[in-house]
Every structure is written in structure tokens, then in C-alpha cells.
Image (tube, rainbow, N blue to C red):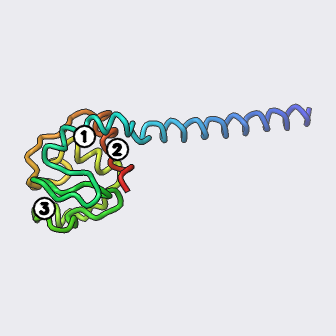
Amino acid sequence: MVRIARGMGVKVVGRLALAAAAAAFVGTAAQAAGDAAAGKQVFTQCAICHNAAKGAPNKIGPNLFGIVGSKAGEVPGFNFSPAMKNSGITWTPDKIAAYANDPQKTVPGNRMPFAGLHNDKKAADVAAYLATLK
């Protein structure tokens, strides 16, 4: 009887561990980075206003090369809105995706005229692409 109880306890613990691992994986998958190759294609819409090449000049919008990990409003030589300068954002892929999806919701009062992608997949893909530019 003790062996069965122990065995069942191990099975229960094993199942709980498996369930926890599955939940972590699902949570990670939901937040997983997008497809950088697809994001490069989506970025062609962004490239009308933004460069993304190392050392390239700013355009209507700031150069986005190396943007991941930087603070909002700090690209040299670009005149950012007070809203962007004061946003306190550090650009992570998640923040970039949110901003690409809906700039005014993410940083109210920013000057970017683009209304946003309004597509979670495309926004995650663009963020994944920008994360490759280091």
C-alpha cells in the first residue's frame, strides 16, 4: 500500500511538473519573438520614414538600427517629441511590437504619423527583425 501511495505521489508530482512546464512553454510561445525574415518584409512599410542600417542618417523618423535595448527618445540627431523623450521606455521587442501596432496608444502624444500595423503577428515580426540589427 505504501509503494502504491508513493508511486501515485510520484505520478502526481510528475504530472504537476509536466503541467507547469507546459504552461511555461505556452506562455513563452505566446510571447515568443516573431519571424525576423517576415519582419524584414513588413519593415519595407517602415522604411519610407526609417533607416535601419548602421550609420545611416535619420529620415523623417529616427534610424532604428540597434534600437533594441536603447531608451526611447535617444537616437542621436533626431528631434523627438516630448512625449517620446519622457516616456521612460526602454525598447524591448515587446515594446517595439506594441508601438508598431498602435503608436498613439503606446506613447500618447508622439509625433509619428503612422496609425500602426494593427496586426499582432506583423508587429512581432518587425520587432524580431529590429532585434537582429546590432
Label 3 with label 2: CB-CB less than 8 Å = no
Label located before the other in sequence (3 or 2): 3
> Callout 2, which amino acid?
Tyr
Q: Residue 59, percent across and down?
A: 12, 54
Label located before the other in sequence (1 or 3): 1
For the C terminus, the quadrant is bottom left
Q: Residue 21, percent across and down?
A: 61, 40
Q: CA distance from mark 3 to mark 2?
A: 25 Å
For the N terminus, the quadrant is top right
Q: Residue 15, percent across and down?
A: 69, 34
Mark 1 — residue?
Answer: 43
Answer with left or right where residue 121 lies relative to residue 60.
Answer: right
Label 2 with label 1: CB-CB less than 8 Å = yes
Mark 2 — residue?
Answer: 129
Q: Is residue 13 above or below residue 59?
A: above
Disc number for residue 83: 3
Q: Nearer the viewer, mark 3 or mark 2?
A: 2
Q: Residue 97, percent across and down?
A: 29, 44
Label located before the other in sequence (2 or 1): 1
